Image: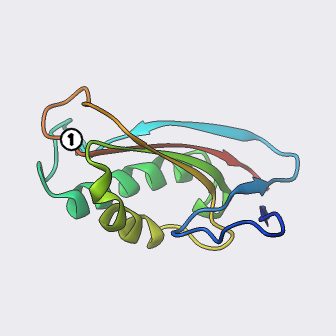
Amino acid sequence: MAERIVPPHFAAPTGPWSPAVKAPPGEMLFIAGCVSVDEDGTVVAPGDIECQTQQVMKNFQAVVEAAGMTMGDVGKTTNFLLDVRDYPAMAAVRQQYLAEPYPASTMVQVSGFLYQGLLVEIEGIAVAR
């Protein structure tokens, strides 16, 4: 099980993330950026950040589970948003898939994605227990 690391006198995280996560030795899984596409490669819910984040997290979880891991093994995520103002909605959906200790997390605003209509992409690292 990962251990949440929050240094003393550190500002409390403002969402489902940790400043750092310490994981015991184990197999590592590097999860490529997951986007809001279905099994046919069609963009799901263009323009809808909540629906897109649901699809992203569904795809992310499928990758993690295909590797024989659980979402509790995720220690790091990097979140890419077209518009940083969508962060609260994205974080609320993402929180439904993650639990304490939340993964260390980075949020980046980008100017665009590979496919037209995408609003969010999430990549990560998991460590098997």
Residue at x-position 26% and y-position 42%: 82
Q: Residue at x 30, y 61 (%)?
A: 54
The quarter of the displayed image where residue 2 is located:
bottom right
Q: Is 45 located above or below residue 40 in the figure?
A: below
74 relative to 41 in the view: left or right: right
* Image quarter in which the N terminus is found: bottom right
Q: Please tell me in which quadrant of the rendered image residue 103 appears.
A: bottom right
Q: Residues within 10 Å of mark 1 (few under 14, many from 20)?
A: many
Q: Is residue 77 left or right of residue 116?
A: right
Q: Position of residue 88 (x, y in %)?
A: 35, 67
Image quadrant where one finds the C terminus: bottom right
Q: Nearer the viewer, residue 79 or 123?
A: 79
User: Is residue 6 depicted above or below 35 in this figure?
Assistant: below
Visible residue check, residue 26: yes
Q: Give the secondary structure at mark 1.
A: loop
Q: Is residue 55 visible?
A: no
Which residue: 39% across, 56% down?
Answer: 57
- Asked whether 26 or 20 is in front, the reply is 20
Mark 1, residue position:
118
Q: Of the residues shown, which amino acid type is indicated by label 1?
A: Leu
Residue 10, quarter of the rendered image = bottom right
